[in-house]
Amino acid sequence: MDQQLEASTLGMWVFLVTEIMFFGGLFMAYIVYRYWYPDAWAAASNHLNVRMGGAQHARADLQLADDGAGGPRGADRIAQAARSST
């Protein structure tokens, strides 16, 4: 049992470190490119359509709410899994 606890603890730490390295690299790339090319960032921001972005975000939120555990399809999947495990 102690070996399983140590293995799960090590696995969690490895997962956390890899996530920090991955997202740290993404954020660092964002900061570096934003610093190196400020004119390109300013020009690109003029091409953004706020209404379209808001609509896409709302659609994604509704889809996640519908597909998640709280949505109707998610509840059906949970009920089906519970029935099949008994």
Image (tube, rainbow, N blue to C red):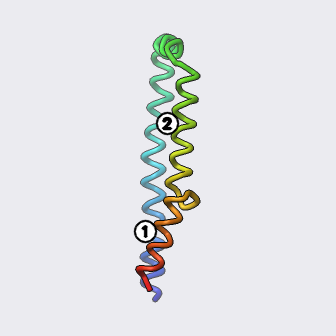
Of all residues shown, which one is farthest toward the bottom?
1
20 up-or-down from 51: above or below: below
Judged from the image, the secondary structure of the residue bearing numbered disc 2 is helix
Residue at image point 51% right, 15% down: 38
Residue 43 spot, x, y in % from top left: 49, 10
Three-letter amino acid code at disc 1?
Answer: Gly
* Crowd class of label 1 (few under 14; some 14 to 19; many from 20; radius 10 Å): few
Q: CA distance from mark 2 to mark 1?
A: 24 Å
Judged from the image, the secondary structure of the residue bearing numbered disc 1 is helix
Q: Are marks 2 and 1 in contact (CB under 8 Å)?
A: no
Q: Residue 77 got which mark?
A: none
84 up-or-down from 47: above or below: below
Residue to which mark 2 is pinned: 27
Q: Earlier in the sequence, mark 2 or mark 1?
A: 1
Pick the front one: 67 or 15: 67
Residue to which mark 1 is pinned: 11
Three-letter amino acid code at disc 2?
Answer: Phe
Pick the front one: 32 or 85: 85
Residue 70 spot, x, y in % from top left: 58, 59
Pick the front one: 31 or 71: 71
Residue at image point 48% right, 80% down: 5
* Crowd class of label 2 (few under 14; some 14 to 19; many from 20; radius 10 Å): few
Quadrant of the image containing the C terminus: bottom left
Residue at image point 46% right, 78% down: 6
Badge count: 2
Residue 28 spot, x, y in % from top left: 48, 34
